[in-house]
Image (spheres, grey):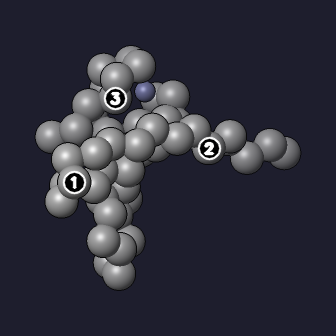
Amino acid sequence: MIKCPFCNQIMEDETPEDSFTDLFRCGACQAQQAVYWEYGERLLTFEPEPEE
Ligand SMILES: [Zn+2]
């Protein structure tokens, strides 16, 4: 289980089927985390919320 490093909420698995990388998103702060299990690396990214 992956938890958001910012608000400690459980991140949802949003990994695309054809992806080599696991992608998780925090529903609370919209932080995204890509996890490269093979290399033991994690990459944090932010995607701005869509504006109306
Ligand atoms: Zn968060």
Q: Earlier in the sequence, mark 3 or mark 1?
A: 3
Q: Which residue is mark 3?
A: 4
Q: Residue at x 22, y 38 (%)?
A: 2
Name the disc covering residue 39, or none. Answer: 1
Query: Could you tell me which secondary element the residue under label 1 belongs to?
Result: loop
Q: Disc 2 marks which amino acid? A: Glu
Amino acid type at image mark 3: Cys
Relative to 52, is 15 above or below?
below
Q: Which residue is mark 2?
A: 47
Label 1 neighbour load within 10 Å: few <14, some 14-19, many 20+? few
Between 24 and 42, the residue placed more toward the observer is 42
How far separated are the C-alphas under marks 3 and 2?
14 Å
Q: Quadrant of ligand 1?
A: top left
Label 3 beta carbon within 8 A of ligand 1: yes
Q: Secondary structure at mark 3?
A: loop
Tell me if mark 3 has few (under 14), some (14-19) or many (20+) residues whose alpha carbon lies within 10 angstroms of its own. Answer: many
In screen coordinates, is 48 left or right of 37?
right
In what quadrant of the picture does the N terminus appear? top left
Q: Which element is circle 2 on?
A: loop
